[in-house]
Every structure is written in C-alpha cells, then in structure tokens.
Image: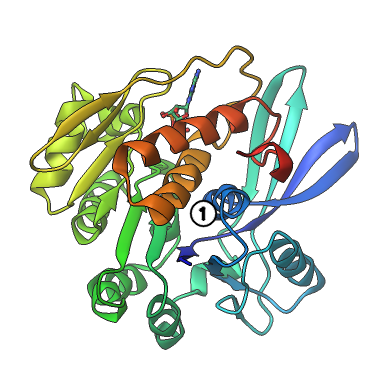
Amino acid sequence: MTSILGIGECMVELSQEDGALWRRGFAGDVLNTLWYARARMGDDDTIGFYSAVGDDAASGEMRDFITEAGIDTTPLQTLPNGVPGLYMIHLDGFERSFSYWRSTSAARQMMTNIDALWSAVSKPDFVYFSGISIAILSPEHREAMLDGIRAHMKEGAQLVFDPNIRPRLWENDAVMRDTITKAAGVADIVLPSFDDERDTFGDKTPDETAARYLAGGARKVIVKNGEEPTLMATPDLQTFVDVPPVSNVVDTTAAGDSFAGGYLSELAASGDDVAAVRAGQATAATCISFKGALAPFSEIK
Ligand code: ADP
C-alpha cells in the first residue's frame, strides 16, 4: 500500500472538432502523471491531487472528472469566486496551435492557505510536482512552498520534481533557472528532459544535466531524451537504459508526464530504480501511441 500526492494545475481543455464545434476535456501536466500512475497502481494505493479550483460549474465538472479517474480530491482547495484556467487547441490540418487563458486561474492561488498544503504532504510516500506547478505561483508562494515542504513530509517520504521547463510561464529566464535549480535541490528525485535542459542551461550532454542537478543537492536524476537512452544517475552510479522502439508514434503530447507516472508507480511498488525507468518508458510508449495526453486506462500496463 503506497500513496502519491501530485501538486499542480488542471485546466479546461477545448479541442476543435469541426469549425465552431469544440470538445471539452480537462488536462494539466501533473494530473496527466497521476492518471498514468493511477492506471498502473492497485486499489489499495492512494493517489491525491493538491490544487485549487473555483466554485463554478466548470470547476465542479473538473472535480468530478478527477474523482472518476480514481484520484482523491480531498486535498483540492475550493476558492470562492475562483475559475479554472482554460486553453483551446486549434487544428489547421495536422498542425495544432494553442491559446491560453490561465493568468487568473484559481490554481495560481493554491498556496494561499499554505497550512492546507502542509497537511496534504504530511502523509504520502511520494510527493510530485513540476516546473509548471511553481511557475504559476507568486514569488512569495514559491518561496514558502520550497522552503517548507520537506519539513512537512513524513520521515522517508520522497519528493519528486520534473522541471518541465516552459519559459513563457516565467517572469524572466534568470528567475526560471534559479527557481528550477532550487526546487531540484530540495527534491530527492529529478526527472528532466534533455532538450529543455540543453536549451535552458546549455548542457551539452545528458551526463552534464545529471551532474548539474546532483551537484545542486538532488539524490537521483533520471534524464529523459526522447527515443535516445534514458540516463539514471546517483552520486555513485550512472546507467543508460535503452528506449524500446515504438512502431506507431501518433502524438507525443504528455510523453514526459506519462513517463513520470509509470516511473513513480513502479518505484512505489518495487523500489527498483531500473525497473522504474523501464516502466516509465513503457508507459510513455503507450501514451505516444494514442492521440491526446491521456491514453485509455485499459491500455496502460
Ligand atoms: P518530454 O515529453 O518531457 O519532452 P521526452 O521527449 O524526452 O520527454 O520523452 C519522454 C519519454 O517518452 C522518453 O524517455 C521515452 O521513454 C518516451 N519517448 C518519447 N519519444 C519517443 C519515441 N519517438 N520513441 C519511443 N519512446 C519515446
């Protein structure tokens, strides 16, 4: 019996069906990860989502969607008069473009009642968050979260961080680099994607990415690199794990999020690092074989 808590933002997603006809869904990087972890974990295991939504109809539907996926919404805060963030996916042939309305989302205020966070992180075996989870917060809330989170987690629990670098969400590049470095230093396990790290920090190889985060205080770093081998590094050990080929790549949206879900669920179950990396790769392979961020539960092994 294990437990994972994810901290992040879920948004309303509108994807263009046909001209002015739109399909409503819900998505967000951390929620995607919890979805894949949930599909691979047992009924006895608990997966919870810490965020904030409003008290409007869209927030209610979002809460129902998350609950129906088997994810515990007890930690989800409800803010009076709040509304969720929204994005639209426009289709032009096979090209997709995105419009976002998230600057006033309730999730940005999820640390307003920081005691609610301290209570939520006090029980789970794993606490997971991403660079997006902290990019959307005010500088004061970021600092409060990163300075206090470890002390409020239970003994032996592990903090897991995916930098998921999105420069447009940050006020400037210097703050982005400093905050991501600080978050990774607080974490036990860091799950970066090499492309983002190269572009943001100038790393020439995945080894350099791992070495930089280990030097900053992380205890374990898993560097994803698309179809190239995945690097698992601790201060004493470095292993590259080959990525099994995927014959029919349909849509790589949420590849990294699903990797994290597979990785976490296996690490929680067996504690075996290499098995966890392989589970991450297998889960990502399923994700990229389907359209959209969330593959059907029944297909996730
Ligand atoms: P992100 O989505 O965060 O940029 P990556 O592109 O590095 O992350 O992909 C995450 C994981 O998804 C990889 O470690 C790999 O396991 C899997 N993956 C991504 N692209 C492919 C691909 N073309 N073939 C097989 N696996 C892939």
For the C terminus, give its image quadrant: top right
| Colour pattern of the rendering | rainbow
Q: Secondary structure at mark 1?
A: helix
Point out the residue furthest to the top here.
247
| Location of residue 166 (image quadrant) | top left
Tell how many labels.
1
- Determine whether 287 is above or below 251 in the image: below
Is residue 125 in sight in this rendering?
A: yes
Q: Is residue 248 left or right of residue 34?
A: right
Is residue 130 in sight in this rendering?
A: no
- Determine whether 278 is above or below 50 in the image: above
- Residue 151: % across, % down: 24, 79
| Location of residue 188 (image quadrant) | bottom left
| In-front residue for pair 245/119 | 245
| In-front residue for pair 296/251 | 296
- Residue 29: % across, % down: 53, 49
Q: Is residue 293 left or right of residue 21?
A: left
Q: Is residue 203 left or right of residue 153?
A: left
Q: Residue at x 61, y 30 (%)?
A: 286
Ligand 1 closer than 8 Å to label 1 CB: no
Q: Residue at x 38, y 68 (%)?
A: 125
Q: Is residue 77 left or right of residue 175?
A: right
- Determine whether 286 is above or below 9 in the image: above
Q: Which residue is mark 1?
A: 30
- Residue 43: % across, % down: 62, 63
Q: Residue at x 46, y 18 (%)?
A: 244
Amino acid type, residue under disc 1 in the picture:
Val
- Residue 111: % across, % down: 44, 77
